[in-house]
Amino acid sequence: MLPGILEQARMFLKEVIPEGGTAVDATAGNGHDTLFLTGCTGPEGKVYSFDIQQQAADNTASRLKNAGAEAEIIVSGHQHALRYIQEEVIDAAVFNLGYLPGSDKTVTTTPETTIAGLEGFLNRLKKGGRVVIVVYHGHSEGKVEKDRLLTFSEALPQKEFQVLQYQFINQKNSPPFLLIIEKK
């Protein structure tokens, strides 16, 4: 069977994050990606996890504590991430767009903040590093964000980046898809 979107996202990330590396969860949510990234970087690596909602930070902290893992959890938007990231280069970053599952669905990621965060991460990304974006576009803000992200990604210079769109095209109800941006 083909791997699902989230499983495939993790495969694309794991391929480029070395033990001792640096990774960023741009949208902490319930902490699933943050915990996954700590497994990739190992105890000598560094994981930064961002979210604008305290509930997301608390959920992530609880998940990490239960697993015996550590990350730097920051209650701030991903557009401000570079203020907190000490390393000159990062190996990978992941975005899960949309809203915090089980929470207020009116608090969503926006195209402006997502693209601002993405630009920052792309500037710090090592050669061969990747930013993986899970695009959820089944809600009104998500549709706008999807369109703006596709326009942004298509315009990235081919000599500097490769951009892959991974999606299932025979599923109903606006299924999520991946954008994978790799620095050459």
Image (spheres, rainbow, N blue to C red):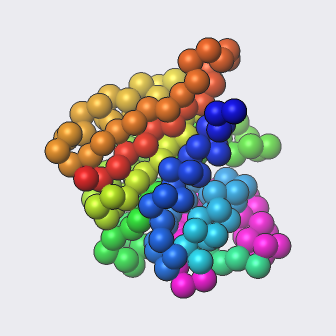
Lateral position of residue 97 relative to residue 63, left or right: left
Q: Quadrant of residue 112?
A: top left
- Spot the residue most to the left: 159
- Which of 23/30 is in front? 23
Lateral position of residue 158 relative to residue 15, left or right: left
Quarter of the figure with the N terminus: top right
* Residue at the (62%, 71%) spot, across then down: 38
List x then y, in percent, for residue 20: 49, 79
List x then y, in percent, for residue 59: 76, 62
66 magenta-colored: yes
85 magenta-colored: no
Is residue 122 visible to the viewer in this orientation of the structure? yes
Lateral position of residue 48 relative to residue 102, left or right: left
Region rendered in magenta: 43-67
The relative height of residue 27 versus residue 64 in the rendered view (above or below) is: above
Q: Quadrant of residue 101?
A: top right
